[in-house]
Image (tube, rainbow, N blue to C red):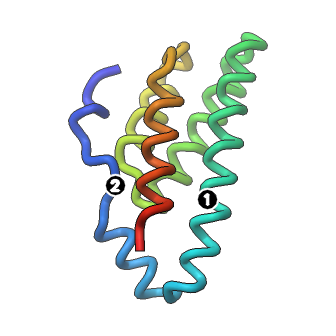
């Protein structure tokens, strides 16, 4: 894993585009759903690794990548893309980026 660390945590332009498109109230609900989904996908990735199910781990990483990308979580999307290519144990890195990204998302307008 390498270049995801050099990416911004969040893309404010994507966030602002979403807020402009759906309104602040709807976006607040979207954030809650994304947080739930992101946590679930991260957990699914680790469970697949624990079960030595590389295909499921890659599928979970792919879904995590898409969800993170859609809501503007750049670092999370990048680390998930790397895990999709190589379903390996990211150690604490995935959980750290996931937690940090969720925190940034929750504090977004």
Name the residue located 64 percent from the left edge and 74 percent from the top edge: 29
Residue bearing the label numbered 2: 10
Image-based side of 4 in relation to 22, left or right: left
Residue bearing the label numbered 1: 34
Front position in the image: 9 or 84: 9
The quarter in which the C terminus is drawn is bottom left
Q: Quadrant of residue 56?
A: top right
Q: Secondary structure at mark 2?
A: loop
Residue 8 point in image, percent of width and height: 26, 47
Q: Badge 2, how many Cα within 10 Å: few under 14, some, many 20+? A: many
Answer with mark 1 or mark 2, whichever residue precedes in sequence.
2
Q: Is residue 96 above or below residue 18?
A: above
Image-based side of 33 in relation to 18, left or right: right
Residue at the right extreme, as displayed: 51
Residue 11 point in image, percent of width and height: 31, 60
Image-based side of 91 in relation to 56, left or right: left
Residue 24 point in image, percent of width and height: 50, 85
The alpha-carbon separation of the residues under discs 1 and 2 comes to 14 Å
Q: Quadrant of residue 5?
A: top left
């Amino acid at each position: 894993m390498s270049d995801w660390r050099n990416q911004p945590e969040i893309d404010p332009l994507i966030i602002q585009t979403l807020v402009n498109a759906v309104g602040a109230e709807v976006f607040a609900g979207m954030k809650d759903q994304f947080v739930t989904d992101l946590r679930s996908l991260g957990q699914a990735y680790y469970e697949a690794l624990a079960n030595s199910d590389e295909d499921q781990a890659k599928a979970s990483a792919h879904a995590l990548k898409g969800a993170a990308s859609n809501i503007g979580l750049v670092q999370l999307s990048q680390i998930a893309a790397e895990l999709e290519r190589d379903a390996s144990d990211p150690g604490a890195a995935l959980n750290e980026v996931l937690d940090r990204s969720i925190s940034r998302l929750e504090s977004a307008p």
